[in-house]
Each structure stands twice: as C-alpha cells, then as structure tokens.
C-alpha cells in the first residue's frame, strides 16, 4: 500500500522542521552535533524519560567527556555513573562499542551505516539517530514515538509491536525525510511524539502537521497506533539480607557477569521459595558461617522491571563472626557502599540504614 501517495512531501517537511526549530526544547545533548554526545544521549533515552535522563547525561559527560575517557574507564565506574537509570546492559554495551571505536576508528564515531551496525548495542534506531542528527545523513530513526506519529499521520493500521511493521515505517520515512535537513526532520518527529502526538489525548489542535494527518481528518486518532499487549509480567519475592556486624560493616555481593543487573552490587538475596521464614536464621548461619544476634524487619521494597516485579522482604540481621570474603563478596561500611553501583531496589534498602 502506498501510504504517501496523497501527501505533499515538501510542505510536510517545511511544516515539521519550522515547528521544531521554533519550539524545540533546550536539552544538553542538543548543544552541538557531536556524534559521541548524540550517541550517549540516544542510548540513555531508550526506555527512559527525557527529564530523568538530563542530570544523568550531564553527570556522565562530566565523568567521561570523550570517547577515550569512557573507553579507558573501569566498568564499575561506568555502572556507578549509570546507577538508577536501569537497563544496565546499555552502559556495558556502550563502553564496549566505544572501545571498538577508539581502537579501530581512531576515536572517531563512524559515519557509515555498515560500520555502525557492527558496534555492540547500536541497533537500527540508534544508527539512524547518529547518522541523521550528528552527520546530517537522510537515514530513518524509527522509535515508538515516530511510529505513533506516522501511524496517525498516514493512518497506518499495522501492529507496531511486530518487527515487520518497522520495515513499513522505514520505507515511509526514507521517502518523507528532508535531504536538506535530516537532523531537524528526525528530531522534529521525535519531539512531536513527545510533546504533541502523545499516546493518550494527543493535542491535535496544536499540531503543526494537523493538515497532513489522515487519522485526525477521519476522526480515528485515538484508535492509533495499533499495538498488541505484552504478556503478563512475572513476579518474584526474595528475602534481602542486610547483615551488619558490630563495627557497622555490611555484606555486599556482586551479581553474576551475565543476565539481569549484571555486575551490580546488592545485599544478598534469597528466593522465599527456597527458605521457610521460620528457618531463615539457620539458613543464614549455615551459609555465611556467622552467629545471629538479632533480626528486625525494615520496610519492604517493591521494584518493577519491564518484564517482572521484585518484592523484597528486607531483614536487618545483626551478626558476629568472620565471613569468608571474596572478590564478589565484600564487607563494607556505609560510606564505602555509597561508592558501589547498586540497583535501584537496593539503593532503597541502603537509604533505610
């Protein structure tokens, strides 16, 4: 189906870009077109709101102002700077890809699509964003915002949750995108989705491209885009063991190298299915070879991931005895813990101490 047969492409481009250049938000990554800054911002903005990202971006660029600075940084330092943003594989993949750029591209972000494709964590959207925003190349950058906007503008009634639908949008954008100013075009599409063409109750009367919008014309803007719902999230309940000795030191362990929250540090956790609450003291004493002096409850913690929910039953356990420490099991003071990257759920435990 030819979705753009009746659209006035030059007028569409003009209306969108004029609006964007006049109304765009002042954001720290828009200060220039530096490819590294664009890259970092786009990785951070995945699954994360703009207002949340701003202070993280500023702090990250303060710590790692150049590709070389990030490439040479210790991974734990990078994770600490990312602490609280979630989806920590983004940070690890970013550093891995930056090391590749420093080693093989003389610390210059490549401007060739196939070369960007080879970099870890750089998918079609990030590649398109870097090429269009930083290098002014007319490449599509298709994310949820853009698919929502175009679903309405062109009345595309395909399920945006399906991978094949992205190809439809990429084809459409390649025909619509401004070759004179692809940076402003793509950013304008993203900005429109964020500020005007929102998921619920779009502000159609304020939309600069309302005159081009088929969904608005047909009165169906509230029904688009079409998106099938995800499967129900799973949930897990754990005992979070906040073990403190007489000197005020706590036990922290490092999560596995792969998987959810890889390489972050946490208070030890035990699945409640593995240990009966009445046997928890015995379990802790046998596993950690300590004596328990007392146990008290702290406030429980709930944390929602994109695909699951954690419920943490937090136990403050006063212990005595010497724990067998390793590289991945540490005994740390409160001040020392503050220097380690913790998941948000365990930051919320830490705040109770």
Image (tube, rainbow, N blue to C red):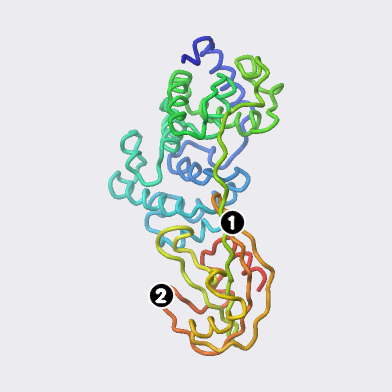
Q: Is residue 280 left or right of residue 125?
A: right
Question: What is the CA distance from the residue labelled 2 to the residue labelled 1?
Answer: 29 Å
Q: Where does the image place residue 77, in percent across and percent down from the top left?
A: 46, 62
Mark toward the start of the polypeptide (2 vs 1):
1
The structure residue drawn at horizontal position 69% and vertical position 23%, both measured from the top left corner, is 204
Front residue of 168/9: it is 168
Quarter of the image for residue 275 reads bottom right
Which-is-in-front pick, marks 2 and 1? 1
Front residue of 270/15: it is 270
In the rendered image, the vertical position of residue 262 relative to residue 224, given as above or below: below
Q: Where does the image place residue 65, in percent across and percent down from the top left?
A: 46, 51
Could you classify mark 1 by the number of other residues whose Cα lies within 10 Å: few (under 14), some (14-19), or many (20 or more)? some
| Residue named by callout 1 | 309
SS for dot 1: strand
Front residue of 243/225: it is 225
Numbered marks: total: 2
SS for dot 2: loop
The structure residue drawn at horizontal position 53% and vertical position 85%, both measured from the top left corner, is 285
Front residue of 285/40: it is 285
Quarter of the image for residue 36 reads top left
Query: Residue 327 has which mark?
Result: 2
In the rendered image, the vertical position of residue 185 relative to residue 94, given as above or below: above
In the rendered image, the vertical position of residue 348 relative to residue 162, given as above or below: below
Could you classify mark 2 by the number of other residues whose Cα lies within 10 Å: few (under 14), some (14-19), or many (20 or more)? few
């Amino acid at each position: 189906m030819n979705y753009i047969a009746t659209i006035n492409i030059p007028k569409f481009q003009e209306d969108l870009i004029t609006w964007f250049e006049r109304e765009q938000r002042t954001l720290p990554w828009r200060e220039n077109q530096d490819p590294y800054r664009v890259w970092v911002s786009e990785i951070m903005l995945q699954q994360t709101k703009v207002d949340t990202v701003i202070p993280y971006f500023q702090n990250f660029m303060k710590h790692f102002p150049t590709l070389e600075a990030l490439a040479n940084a210790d991974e734990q330092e990078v994770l600490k700077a990312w602490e609280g943003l979630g989806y920590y594989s983004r940070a690890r993949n970013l550093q891995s890809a930056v090391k590749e750029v420093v080693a093989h591209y003389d610390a210059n972000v490549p401007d060739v699509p196939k070369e960007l494709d080879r970099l870890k964590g750089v998918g079609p959207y990030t590649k398109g964003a870097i090429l269009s925003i930083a290098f002014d190349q007319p490449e599509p950058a298709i994310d949820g915002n853009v698919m929502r906007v175009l679903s309405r503008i062109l009345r595309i009634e395909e399920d945006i949750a399906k991978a094949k639908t992205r190809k439809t949008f990429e084809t459409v954008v390649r025909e619509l995108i401004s070759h004179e100013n692809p940076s402003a075009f793509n950013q304008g599409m993203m900005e429109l989705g964020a500020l005007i063409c929102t998921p619920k109750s779009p502000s159609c009367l304020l939309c600069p491209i309302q005159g081009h919008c088929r969904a608005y014309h047909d009165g169906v803007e509230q029904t688009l885009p079409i998106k099938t719902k995800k499967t129900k999230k799973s949930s897990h309940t754990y005992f979070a063991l906040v073990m403190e000795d007489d000197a005020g030191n706590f036990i922290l362990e490092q999560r596995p190298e792969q998987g959810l929250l890889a390489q972050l540090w946490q208070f030890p956790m035990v699945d409640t299915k593995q240990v009966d609450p009445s046997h928890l003291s015995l379990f802790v004493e046998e596993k950690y070879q300590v004596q328990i002096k007392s146990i008290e409850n702290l406030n429980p913690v709930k944390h929602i991931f994109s695909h699951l929910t954690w419920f943490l039953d937090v136990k403050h356990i006063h212990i005595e005895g010497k724990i067998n420490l390793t590289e991945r099991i540490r005994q740390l003071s409160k001040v020392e813990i503050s220097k380690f990257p913790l998941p948000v759920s365990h930051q919320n435990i830490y705040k109770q101490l």
